[in-house]
Image: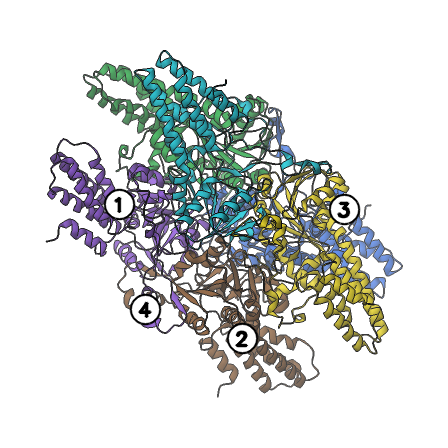
Chain colours: A brown, B purple, C cyan, D yellow, E green, F blue
């Protein structure tokens, strides 16, 4: 029977476990379970075996951002001295417990903070289907704010349908538009609210393709842009200059394979994300408070607890292969 | 049996005849045919009866731009003096013939001029499926230019499929992307080429929804934007302050009606066009040469031959009802 | 008894006759009266004597813009050939009559055209107390448009009080704000409507101090700026490089003289106008139609009828003395 | 006889004690006095009673920024352990003493630092009547810098008269201009120096209405903008997403009540402050050094000593009622 | 003995005759001389032979701008009807005479107009060694304006040394700086004055490499940019979409050949010109008056007298080969 | 025989020891040597004598940035308590050793981090001859990245020749251009890489004259700008408002003295550096990681270990005399 650790690692690898928050919590739960069962004759040996478990998990998705943040966060508990394996085990378990709780509360806290930026009469615009961004809107509605939302279609996977479902069910008056219509309506919009897949040390925000275009149009119209993101979205390895890899997904998402054959000399390009430079972002709302994007370094260092010394400088360059060749100002390093 | 005039008027009204160029030529052909059959005892009477025909045609689609431009252009022939009805009829017919030929040649001339702006190694981006914009690319390819094109999907009606079909068939290496990905690739792009549905007196370009967002991203990246447009796309009544009506099309284009029922509190907004301000356009290529957008007034006055005195000042305000309520800088007046 | 010509010249000089339109019409009326009474034995002599009258009038306010435009416009009638003094006199009188009528109708026509740019639900902002700008708003209200206006105080002479009086009386919901609050409310504003004191050949608009700041804030917010101006506000001598003089008015307008004595080392600077560069103006509405600011040259040449050959190149440089030393991009030449 | 604590609370409430610095020092003095007289049997009880005093003071002006900063700063002394009430009392008193001294020195230190940014030949522009901004100019003059200042009128309360009085008395050559003339002179200006009423976590600066317009014009002209502000102007609750409330003051400040009756359909809007986004601010000079605006979070956390854990998440939403509905990018959260 | 026509053609080809003005006048003089000696039995034959001479001259430097403008201008005289060869010859000679005189006066007129834009106390910046730009400064100095100039070095050919020689001799206080220092001093500069090698139909200005960088820095600082250019610098074929060829000159200008051998893997890129987009130019001063850059089309059509019908549409594409592959927005077509 | 301390001080003063890194290491080595030989009866006396040595070194080049950073860094070791002079000496020596090693490794680490921002197919542009910027490019080449570089000439001292020598020797395909051509090629460039002479607390980067112009052109083209700089380039005294002095070097660098005599009324202005505002910089790569420019304060405080309390507030104002009078936004304080 495979251990929970191996099983979790496998599921993350095969992307059965998806989503920054779920990956983070699953990895920590697996480490916690592993710590309770692993045999060790000394604190030193315990540390070593947990280190092996850490390595296993980190290898599953080298470019995920929340995974190393989560693992690093709880492994920090083992850097202290312990009188016995038992006490180390206990303390480690407590750290895991605490991480999971904080992670589960993160979205709710972000919602509370973000909701304060939404006022009666506001017109909002959101892109894609971010749990944290939705939390801000739902919480604002819950406490009685009266506003309307423009939600985009989000080609090619049409996540906008999920978003209008959620908003509409809650009773929030929602307008549904194609992605191209964002600038057309932008002069009516008071606040753009989006999530993030990753945030670079220089405050550049990696999010669903199209976000940077919307943020640009917002900036042109003096419309505020608020990003809602859990702290584990901040990518520590960008401090070392690594790029956040912009995945190019399957062409069939854009051009169904039955059609593709009809077109000669045509290649589908399907980047999943783009990079919004910090200058187009007014505020990032995290569970640790609202910050300007330039504070990303402080979040990585002081909240996530990374230190330049923690990194392995000889990090393999192979990991960057196959990355998209297009970057704008604010392109961002990877975790 | 209905006359060709009545028949054409009906077809334009029911939008069986569509497209700026086709509407223009059909209206002129109908006037030409009408002029050859209409009974008149004097030049004066001939003028009067042709004027009635003009009024009939103009009433079919009050917001089309090419229709009044075409009709006005040939009716100008009747403003001169004629010794007999026969000579007036003859001259009018000649004017109609000449208009139709120039109209048919316009796209080819635009292609020749626009092609000179495309160079070996260039990366182009186009949006929607403009005959004039395609002519520039096809002509450039024909004379041996080596370049590649990014073509967008163009939601909600996916005209991008037509575009990649045409480009790919011609052998031009073409990339197909969702509309949201325009800014992602913009730093690689050397030239944006688009068409126009209408151009305002201040050089603002009305074109397929999403064009203004692409032009904005091009401006941000110091990428040139070239608009290919026949002169009859310039909207004379914008000199009188009329807005070019931005049509909102059927919601089911965006959200199929079978889905719409599932969503509560959701309204689809489906503007067909947006307005690109002149400051984001480097050049407009017409069959009368390449011009900066600020020359729109000169095109309307000197090429289309409109004069401020030609207009009926008491133009009904009813025509503006139902217009979209959202405009940016450079919103534009109607024809 | 002084002639009407001398009397009018004196009144313009002493600024008893003020306002671009009133000066223009008074000068033309004086020329008309003079033409009917002046004794001349030949057309040549008639031309000569009218030329002396022209010179007298032009000397009264060398920096006014409408004065030379008006005088030049009617004097053009004398450049043609006439069989007799009587016919010249008659034709000249007709030209004067026609000028006065067109001038009187100009504001009404501007109102009709400008009103079409105002829509239901719009929020407008106006600065100072321009007759032409007010005409646009009043006409829009008259034909049933539903909108509200922000009007500024317009320090130091508080012309805003006149504006809110006129707007309020008409029933238009009006907000009154200090000049400094324009940017605060700009994100709510759909359209800025202002007048002009003079317009330079490059489309720069000279208007009440503060206008350029408001236009800048509008541009920052993607809010449209519409300038309402009679064609005689376009300054022909700017083609020759002359600056439009920015008058510095009396310090006591800003700091009442009874206070001034209390302040040591303090100097009041009181420029009456500033210069808005063409890039912040979307449209200029004239009685000859709406144009982009870059069409100023065409207005001067084709509507006002000036030709480079009309100008006296040796124009005295003394006239520029005492001008303010501060100019931004778009500073503008004088008439 | 009312205690000094109650008396101070009352005076702050009734706005007899005004100004960020004075409120801060008065509150701390009241707490100090209270600590010396309050009866307590244990350190715990002492803490409790002081906590009640803290609550009383904080309730007086829920939106002031300096008040919670000051109170929080000295109450921190009570978070440590003490062997006796006496020692706690003593330490608390020392903390209060130290706070007051630092507060009193803050403006002087800001003056010293800010003065180094003023050079011989500089032209400065200031808006409103900020003690800290004046300190920079007066100190620069004292150490021999040779410069001139443009000072605005500051409608509607004309605080500019105070400013030109102070500057002129010191011998500094000063120009007095209406608020609208700032852009006109901006190309001559080397440095804009203003104060702040509050600074948000994202570096947005809340200051006298008109400041943001001046900062925008400065940015357009590549003129530097320096904000002089004591650290207690940084608003900690903005980390929680609260807005800094923009007060709308009495209409009669703008339109004397005797006039108001004359105007129908007119409403005065009188916001006292506006929000300057961080991108228009080059430097904020505090008594703890010069920083870029994006360091606001660090000031709040490391200098003011706030921690996300310090905040009461359930902060009442009622406090935001009645706030102005207009915000630009960089609108800012409240304290 | 070679005819003057052949001789002139040869000298233009071998670049013994250089400079836009000199080429223009030499070609016209050669045509004039040719017209006086050519044998023709009829006006038709005369036209034909002159047409051959025209063709010969135009073939010498296909990318010059002033050459076709000059030749086209005088050949227009032959489009009219003449009773005899003698009268055609006479009229043609008069047209040539007149062209040469206007050309010789152009720089002086530009100087007169441009000088009015220079005021006491101004700081100017100029780049390269333009006769027309110098004329503005020298004339301003002659009429008593008091100003100083920053002149750049103008690598790689150091034409700045000529400029400071001319300015300094005239007594104008001149600062000499490296090209890289333009932005450093730009905040002190009131007006940038440069010449042009060619101007495109959309107002883009082709001038010495580095000009566009200076214009960009001027725009960033709200400093005005004035271009001084004779009307024959406007490139008519840009209306047909042709690019103005940006010549890449010999590497040895940048890296002396004796050095070049020392460097491996190094290639010198030496473009002689760059393209300044119209949005960075406030005014173009021509001998026909000051205009905004967007008026280029009008200059080409109304002053230079070109008509779209004049052009040979089948213009060979070969002429664009070898052009530089780098263009920014505003890259411009060739003549 | 002069001590190594005195000798080093002299060499730094006479600029025999140059370059930020070399000065820093030489000063620390001299302090280390001095600490090993200085006689002291107590830790207190040891501290005092080392303090005298510190003062001597700091006085040699009051405006260098790396010198006080280095000295301050090692002197921090003496602030702790020691049981004996010997142990203090030992610890101090260790601190010096460690500083020198870290300094020597800094460039290598910057190279490793910066190299990750360079990708296959990239086009880079560099200005001047920065060791740290070169390290990024050389390391990227070493690990197999395939890219090309544009390197500028760098007038007036032509350091570009050193740069193309180094790049070319390494095999990197390099283009050599005059400084003025940067904008011409910028649209082809993916990444600008430059070094820094000093960095201000607000992230403004002081570097070789011309850098700010290139960064501006990069920003206009949405091209990323990466600054490579060791942490000791961050200028701590800018927190106190001091300007970083922009040195004006000898005129003969620009205009050889043999030429200078030929020019009347001409003055050479030769600033060695300019200031690039933070908004044009995407990332600063230091040996402590990549950061946004706004993190400069954190580097100064947390990495360099300066505290506001460390500074002598009464710092002499004389040091600012003779500074250049021209500053843009982002002008920066001195060290």
The residues bearing labels 3 and 4 have C-alpha atoms spaced at a distance of 80 Å
Q: Residue B312 at what x, y percent from top left?
A: 30, 42
Res E244 quadrant in image: top left
The residue singled out by tag 2 in the image is: A24
Which of label 4 and label 2 is nearer to you?
Answer: 4
The residue singled out by tag 4 in the image is: B256
The residue singled out by tag 3 in the image is: F9
CB-based contact (under 8 Å), mark 4 and mark 1:
no
The circle drawn on residue B68 is: 1
The residues bearing labels 4 and 1 have C-alpha atoms spaced at a distance of 35 Å
Which of label 4 and label 1 is nearer to you?
Answer: 1
Q: Residue at x 52, y 44 (%)?
A: C163
Q: Label 1 is found on which chain of the structure?
A: B
Q: Label 4 is found on which chain of the structure?
A: B
Badge 4: few (under 14), some or many (20 or more) residues near its Cα, within 10 Å? few
The residues bearing labels 3 and 1 have C-alpha atoms spaced at a distance of 85 Å
Which of label 3 and label 1 is nearer to you?
Answer: 1
Element class at badge 4: loop
Q: Residue at x 82, y 62 (%)?
A: D97
CB-based contact (under 8 Å), mark 3 and mark 4:
no
A218 w.r.t. F329: above or below? below
Badge 2: few (under 14), some or many (20 or more) residues near its Cα, within 10 Å? many
Residue situated furthest top in the rendering = C41
Q: Label 3 is found on which chain of the structure?
A: F
**Badge 1 and badge 2 both on one subunit:** no
Which of label 1 and label 2 is nearer to you?
Answer: 1
């Amino acid at each position: 029977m495979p251990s929970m650790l191996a099983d979790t690692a496998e599921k993350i690898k095969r992307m059965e476990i998806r989503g920054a928050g779920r990956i983070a919590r699953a990895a920590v739960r697996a480490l916690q379970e592993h710590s309770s069962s692993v045999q060790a004759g000394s604190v030193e040996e315990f540390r070593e075996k947990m280190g092996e478990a850490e390595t296993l998990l980190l290898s599953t998705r080298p470019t995920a951002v929340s995974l190393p943040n989560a693992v690093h966060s709880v492994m920090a508990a083992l850097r202290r001295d312990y009188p016995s394996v038992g006490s180390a085990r206990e303390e480690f378990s407590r750290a895991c417990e605490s991480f999971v709780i904080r992670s589960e509360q993160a979205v709710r806290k972000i919602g509370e903070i973000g909701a304060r930026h939404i006022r009666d009469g506001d017109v909002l615009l959101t892109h894609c289907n971010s749990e944290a961004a939705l939390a801000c809107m739902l919480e604002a509605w819950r406490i009685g704010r009266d506003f309307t939302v423009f939600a985009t279609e989000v080609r090619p996977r049409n996540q906008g349908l999920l978003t209008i479902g959620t908003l509409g069910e809650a009773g929030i008056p929602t307008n549904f538009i194609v992605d191209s219509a964002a600038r057309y309506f932008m002069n009516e919009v008071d606040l753009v609210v989006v999530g993030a897949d990753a945030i670079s040390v220089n405050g550049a925000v990696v999010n669903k393709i199209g976000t940077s275009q919307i943020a640009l149009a917002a900036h042109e119209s003096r419309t505020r842009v608020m990003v809602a993101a859990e702290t584990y979205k901040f990518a520590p390895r960008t401090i070392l200059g690594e790029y956040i890899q912009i995945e190019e997904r399957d062409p069939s998402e854009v051009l169904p394979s039955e059609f593709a054959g009809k077109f000669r000399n045509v290649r589908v390009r399907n980047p999943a994300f783009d990079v919004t430079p910090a200058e187009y972002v007014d505020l990032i709302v995290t569970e640790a408070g609202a910050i300007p994007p330039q504070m990303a370094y402080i979040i990585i260092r002081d909240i996530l607890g990374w230190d330049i010394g923690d990194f392995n400088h000889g990090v393999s360059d192979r990991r960057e292969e196959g990355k998209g060749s297009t970057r704008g100002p604010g392109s961002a390093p990877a975790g």
